[in-house]
């Protein structure tokens, strides 16, 4: 029996992963499409006057089976995929694209939505109802509902092509990432690497049936190698492989896909009446238009560039001191020599932190932070099904003991998982206005952290602790969701606001009071020494300006691709070099290319939106300044953040929500002060 076709007989109605097989997806998705079309036919067949209830709410509630099946499929495509699933995606993706177009281009349905929208001023709707009505109408308009019939067919073709190309982009990148390994059999080649890195490489080799050590392009393997490996030629080799992914003539080249994605998105935007794709995307963002995005990027470039240049000169100086005056600092040298400088200045090696960041302790620390701020608690429930043995399931309870959410955690890399870290949901939150039921969310945290070895448990880097806090911030946005309509709940907010709750949580990583709650040596139980914590704090702004320019370079590249007014037919690498040159300080190696592996803007949701990381950073610094003033564990401030921002989702404009919490508009001052750029 197909488990998607009945209520899940599991704790809290969680996904029965143990029962779901690959062959269940297509029948469930096809039936889900059929059911939603029947539900929409029931709306359009009404002879009654269109109302908020019989049209907008009815449409909001449609497609539950389809959503149930596609959510599981799409999440597993990122977290636990395989060749068979990827082949199935090639069948299902155009099917789902066609279905989405059949809805958004349904003229009878749109006319009913439009009729309700046009009389919105007389309907006495709640704030949330008004926002749902507005979003529903705008959603149809932005997906071609106002187009002429001929243009609607063009819109269908464009969206079908885009859906398949984004899928291919991701498949190519995953294949390139998984297919490479640096196999080392001579231990002398490992000079400089910490024991944790060598042990992980030894384990990786053992898993592949090889002698020696294996390093891969996954972050827990790649990043320590670039930071510690003394053999420059090996750093160069690994760097070049990593940064030339999807550029080779090997069947997984993304150059043409990048061009097609850029041009198809431009064509789609212009079909809808916009000059550029950025104009189309930014219309419903906090930034509002490309000029405001560039204003932010330019302000930050101006503020951070002088410091970034000094930072690079300092790293060049130590490189020349150690390796001769004729030494030229290249990108594969940056992590290595900047780490040498950091050690010298702060007498501090980040590897010193690993023993204090055992994953189990970090989990307790991060969960404990939420308990201290909001009163919520976490309890593992082994009866909740999971999709892989690495995954753990927790029940989340509110401060009054009531059930709040389910949280899945998935921490380590494997071949079926995309790189990076993300939060996603298997079920959103919503309320039933008739019964009063508050259907709670099922949330998943997916990361690629350092794995345990035979000798040691999983010991995290400081950066991995920050990543955990970041993604956990996203999960709190979902866990605290408390809205009537699922499409407005949790992280369903403007794209340039969605990173604010996540980046806000990163601030705690450099707070002594927080680190003292969990950071104990995994062998001795010793609390992390105060002097080591102080070195973490003192070094938190080390090369911060260089890191800022790196993010700004990505934002400039993104905007360059999506503020085009004409199709792109040139050389991708040359265009990329020109687009971000103002934020590049180090030489760029021949043949490297970011665009062909920049999944955020080509296969994710960040096209014309990568700036949102810096936009949200301004907000998170401003928000945390209030906690610094009132106390980092201040429950009153935390309750305000929960009530005014985290629980409200997309029910109002994010700036309205933010100012309600903060009592003022944000400026970049708090960010500049936090980063030591401004005193």
Image (cartoon, rainbow, N blue to C red):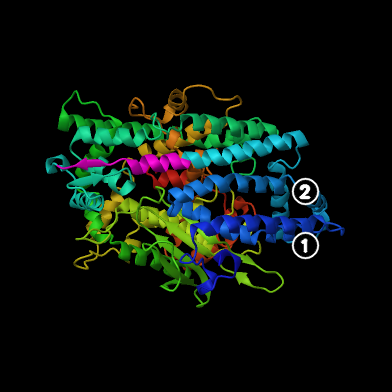
- The reply, left or right, for residue 77 in relation to residue 325 is right
Give percent across and percent down for residue 47: 87, 58
Give percent across and percent down for residue 278: 59, 35
Residue 623 visible from this viewpoint: no
The magenta span reads 170-185
- The reply, left or right, for residue 31 in relation to residue 615 is right
Give percent across and percent down for residue 199: 20, 53
- Which residue does the image show at 35% across and 56% down from the upper left? 412
* Residue tagged 1: 53
- The reply, left or right, for residue 292 in relation to residue 252 is right
The span from disc 1 to disc 2 (Cα, nearest Å) is 15 Å
The quadrant of the rendering that contains the C terminus is top left
* Residue tagged 2: 110
Q: Residue furthest bottom?
A: 401
- Which residue does the image show at 15% across and 40% down from the upper left? 189
What SS does tag 1 mark? helix
What SS does tag 2 mark? helix
Looking at the picture, does residue 371 appear above or below residue 270?
Answer: below
Q: Which is more toward the observer, 358 or 176?
A: 176
């Amino acid at each position: 029996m197909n488990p998607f076709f009945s209520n899940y007989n599991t704790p809290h109605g969680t996904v029965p992963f143990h029962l779901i097989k690959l062959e269940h997806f297509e029948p469930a998705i096809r039936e889900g499409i059929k059911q939603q079309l029947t539900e929409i036919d029931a709306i359009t067949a009404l002879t009654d006057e269109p109302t908020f209830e019989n049209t907008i709410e009815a449409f909001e509630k449609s497609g539950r089976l389809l959503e149930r099946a596609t959510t599981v499929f799409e999440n597993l495509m990122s977290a636990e995929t395989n060749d068979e699933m990827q082949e199935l995606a090639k069948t299902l993706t155009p099917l789902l694209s066609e279905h989405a177009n059949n809805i958004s281009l349904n003229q009878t349905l749109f006319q009913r939505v439009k009729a309700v929208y046009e009389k919105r001023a007389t309907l006495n709707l709640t704030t949330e109802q008004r926002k749902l009505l507005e979003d529903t109408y705008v959603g149809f308009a932005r997906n071609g509902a106002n187009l002429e019939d001929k243009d609607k067919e063009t819109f269908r073709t464009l969206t079908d092509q885009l859906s398949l190309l984004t899928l291919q982009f991701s498949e190519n990148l995953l294949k390139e990432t998984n297919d490479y390994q640096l196999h080392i059999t001579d231990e002398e080649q490992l000079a400089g690497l910490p024991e944790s890195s060598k042990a992980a490489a030894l384990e990786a080799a053992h898993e592949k049936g090889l002698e020696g050590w294996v390093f891969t392009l996954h972050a827990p393997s790649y990043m320590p190698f670039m930071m510690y490996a003394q053999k420059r030629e090996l750093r160069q080799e690994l760097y070049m492989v990593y940064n030339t992914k999807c550029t080779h003539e090997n069947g997984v080249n993304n150059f043409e896909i990048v061009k097609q994605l850029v041009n198809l998105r431009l064509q789609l935007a212009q079909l809808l009446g916009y000059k550029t794709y950025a104009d189309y995307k930014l219309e419903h963002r906090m930034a509002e238009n490309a000029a405001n995005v560039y204003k932010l990027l330019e302000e930050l470039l101006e503020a951070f560039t002088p410091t970034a240049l000094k930072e690079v000169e300092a790293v060049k100086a130590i490189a020349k001191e150690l390796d001769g005056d004729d030494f030229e600092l290249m990108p594969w040298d940056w992590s290595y020599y900047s780490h040498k400088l950091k050690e010298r200045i702060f007498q501090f090696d980040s590897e010193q932190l690993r023993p204090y960041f055992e994953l189990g302790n970090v989990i307790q620390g991060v969960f404990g932070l939420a308990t201290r701020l909001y009163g919520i608690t976490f309890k593992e429930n082994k009866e909740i099904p999971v999709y892989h043995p690495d995954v753990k399931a927790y029940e989340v309870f509110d401060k009054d003991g009531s059930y709040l959410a389910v949280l899945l955690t998935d921490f380590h890399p494997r071949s079926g998982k995309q790189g990076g870290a993300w939060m996603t949901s298997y079920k959103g939150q919503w309320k039933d206005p008739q019964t009063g039921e508050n259907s709670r969310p099922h949330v998943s945290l997916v990361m690629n952290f350092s794995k345990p070895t035979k000798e040691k448990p999983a010991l995290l880097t400081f950066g991995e602790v920050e990543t955990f806090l970041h993604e956990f911030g996203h999960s709190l946005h979902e866990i605290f969701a408390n809205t009537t309509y699922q499409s407005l709940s949790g992280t369903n907010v403007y794209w340039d606001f969605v990173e604010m709750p996540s980046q806000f949580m990163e601030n705690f990583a450099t707070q002594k009071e927080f680190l003292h709650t969990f950071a104990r040596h995994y062998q001795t139980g010793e609390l992390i020494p105060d002097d080591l914590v102080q070195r973490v704090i003192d070094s938190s702004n080390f090369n911060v300006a260089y890191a800022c320019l790196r993010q700004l370079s990505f934002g400039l590249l993104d905007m360059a691709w999506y503020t085009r007014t004409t199709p792109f037919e040139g050389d991708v690498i040359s265009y990329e070099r020109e687009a971000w040159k103002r934020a590049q300080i180090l030489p760029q190696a021949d043949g490297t290319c970011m665009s062909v592996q920049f999944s955020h803007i080509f296969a994710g949701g960040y096209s014309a939106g990568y700036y949102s990381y810096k936009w949200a950073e301004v907000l998170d610094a401003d928000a945390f300044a209030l906690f610094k003033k009132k106390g980092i564990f201040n429950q009153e401030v935390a309750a305000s953040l929960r009530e005014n921002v985290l629980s409200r989702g997309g029910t109002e404009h994010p700036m309205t929500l933010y100012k309600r919490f903060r009592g003022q508009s944000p400026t970049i001052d708090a960010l500049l002060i936090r980063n030591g750029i401004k005193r």
